[in-house]
Image (cartoon, rainbow, N blue to C red):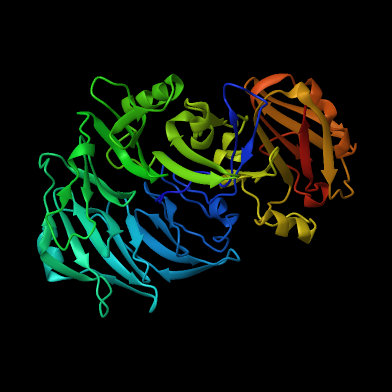
């Protein structure tokens, strides 16, 4: 179960080695976690379920994670952590505030409405029945933890299992206290005592203890107490280094790291196999991130995430030092092809990057990207005068002044043979097609012509990444103040 969501609202991907082929689009929850750690209301106000959220504080752990399965999310930053309930209609209900602590948070539900939340030097239980958040003050718990930070928590075989850097320990589950009783005898020191525990995962019913240089797997089935039984035949020790938090997906373990005398890469561990699945391009980016010291034991700028969509399972890799490029590993197609197949979400290059941020892109349909314009000093307020049915259809607030679109990795754009337009409205004044490729940014004055005339695309030529907007101003940074001169369109590219 993933503990992080993707670093953008929605994304579209095609095979980076076969441009113009199949595309996938996703409707996902975003993680706003930037290198400078800032979080702005503009970035979250268009997010389904968080449209009323705003913050005036940010930090290195800006962003949020979702605990799937019970409908609760954690929205957190290094100044604190808030717990929200996300409803099916996209609204959110604040459940708890000021879940403070250092380091990266870990959270798990026990299936009985009890959540354990740990965040370094503070640990909590949350009772969904009473909406009560309480700091763990159990004397046994505090004695076991001592001066160490709690780094992770999982739930397996009827128990919460916590981990400090050196010790595993458990809380039992019983009726009256629902999993919040600690047993001084239910502790275990990993066999590799020299290694620091980084994370815990439950994979295919086994407890995986992720250390910085070792990985141990334990069978907890039916175990009445500790110490746990280690599964000898699948213990993994590459003598390498695990960076960041590992991720369980499809009964396998994925991580960023390196084996002994091996490059940094994305590895999968399934059974007793430790296999690198990333390609040379991705390995080079990870190596650069390491040299830039952006990959650390608990790094928030380089992360793995997972998603399932349209019958495909994807593992994503986000590197903040790579201009927002996100790589997607297609587990489904890789299994069919017998080789690693990666897709890529391209970056947007404009003359004003802040005015068209990488994390403000919203993909609609399989071939179309509908964007969100402006952040920071370039941000605009209000909603475009559009059909209410369109607003409902897209499910987020659309900023006024400009309709922004983004298409990534379509290859030879001469293959775009027609543009279909729906929901047209009368437009006054001139419109500009402003497009950005890897060669720079250009604007075309479309005059007062219909959007259906935008077959100018046929002459844009070949580009790896392509972004365009329709604006009533030829300048990215200074759109016209008259919002009535701009119309929101729903457009679909037909690809040969």
Residue 147 position, x and y percent, is 12, 55
| Camera-side residue of 66 and 483 | 66
Q: Residue at x 66, y 38 (%)?
A: 477
Apparent side of residue 333 relative to residue 76 in the rendered image (left or right): right
- How many numbered circles are shown? 0
| Camera-side residue of 209 and 438 | 209
Q: Is residue 148 above or below residue 346?
A: below
Residue 14 in which image quadrant? top right
Residue 430 position, x and y percent, is 86, 38
Residue 241 position, x and y percent, is 24, 32
Q: Residue at x 77, y 35 (%)?
A: 493
Q: Is residue 284 above or below residue 14?
A: above
Q: Residue at x 42, y 55 (%)?
A: 57
Q: Residue at x 77, y 39 (%)?
A: 492
Residue 7 position, x and y percent, is 49, 43
Apparent side of residue 400 relative to residue 15 in the rendered image (left or right): right
| Camera-side residue of 464 and 59 | 464
């Amino acid at each position: 179960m993933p503990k992080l969501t993707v670093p953008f609202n929605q994304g579209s991907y095609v095979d980076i080695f076969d441009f113009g082929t199949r595309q996938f689009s996703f409707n996902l929850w975003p993680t706003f976690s930037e290198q400078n750690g800032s979080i702005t209301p503009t970035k979250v106000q268009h997010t389904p379920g968080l449209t009323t959220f705003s913050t005036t504080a940010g930090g290195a752990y800006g962003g949020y994670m979702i605990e799937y399965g019970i409908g609760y999310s954690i929205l957190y930053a290094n100044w604190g952590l808030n717990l929200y309930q996300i409803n099916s209609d996209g609204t959110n209900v604040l459940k708890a505030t000021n879940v403070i602590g250092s380091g990266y948070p870990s959270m798990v539900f026990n299936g009985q409405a009890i959540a354990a939340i740990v965040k370094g030097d503070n640990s909590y239980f949350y009772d969904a029945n009473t909406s009560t958040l309480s700091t763990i003050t159990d004397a046994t718990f505090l004695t076991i933890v001592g001066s160490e930070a709690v780094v992770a928590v999982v739930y397996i075989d009827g128990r919460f299992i916590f981990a400090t850097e050196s010790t595993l320990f458990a809380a039992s589950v019983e009726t009256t206290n629902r999993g919040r009783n600690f047993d001084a005898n239910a502790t275990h020191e990993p066999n590799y005592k020299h290694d620091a525990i980084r994370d815990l995962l439950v994979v295919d019913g086994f407890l995986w203890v992720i250390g910085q240089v070792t990985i141990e797997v334990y069978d907890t089935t039916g175990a009445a107490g500790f110490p746990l039984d280690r599964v000898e035949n699948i213990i993994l020790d590459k003598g390498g280094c695990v960076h960041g938090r590992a991720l369980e997906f499809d009964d396998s373990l994925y991580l960023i790291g390196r084996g002994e005398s091996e490059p940094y890469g994305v590895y999968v561990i399934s059974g007793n196999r430790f296999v690198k699945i990333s390609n040379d391009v991705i390995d080079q980016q990870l190596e650069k991130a390491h040299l830039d010291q952006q990959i650390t034991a608990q790094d928030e700028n380089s992360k793995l995430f997972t998603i399932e969509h349209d019958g495909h399972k994807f593992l994503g890799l986000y590197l903040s030092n790579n201009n927002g490029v996100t790589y997607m590993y297609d587990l489904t197609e890789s299994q069919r092809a017998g080789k690693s197949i990666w897709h890529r979400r391209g970056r947007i290059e404009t003359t004003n990057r802040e005015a068209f941020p990488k994390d403000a892109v919203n993909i609609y349909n399989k071939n179309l990207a509908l964007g969100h314009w402006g952040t920071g000093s370039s941000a605009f307020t209000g909603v475009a005068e559009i059909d209410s049915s369109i607003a409902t259809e897209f499910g987020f607030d659309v900023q006024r002044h400009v309709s922004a679109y983004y298409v990534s990795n379509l290859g030879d754009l001469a293959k775009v043979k027609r543009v279909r337009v729906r929901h047209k409205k009368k437009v006054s004044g001139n419109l500009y097609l402003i497009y950005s490729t890897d060669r720079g940014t250009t604007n075309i004055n479309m005059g007062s012509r219909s959007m259906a005339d935008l077959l100018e695309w046929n002459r844009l030529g070949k580009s790896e990444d392509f972004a365009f907007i329709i604006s009533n101003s030829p300048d990215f940074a200074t759109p016209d103040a008259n919002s009535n001169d701009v119309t929101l369109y729903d457009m679909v590219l037909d690809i040969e």
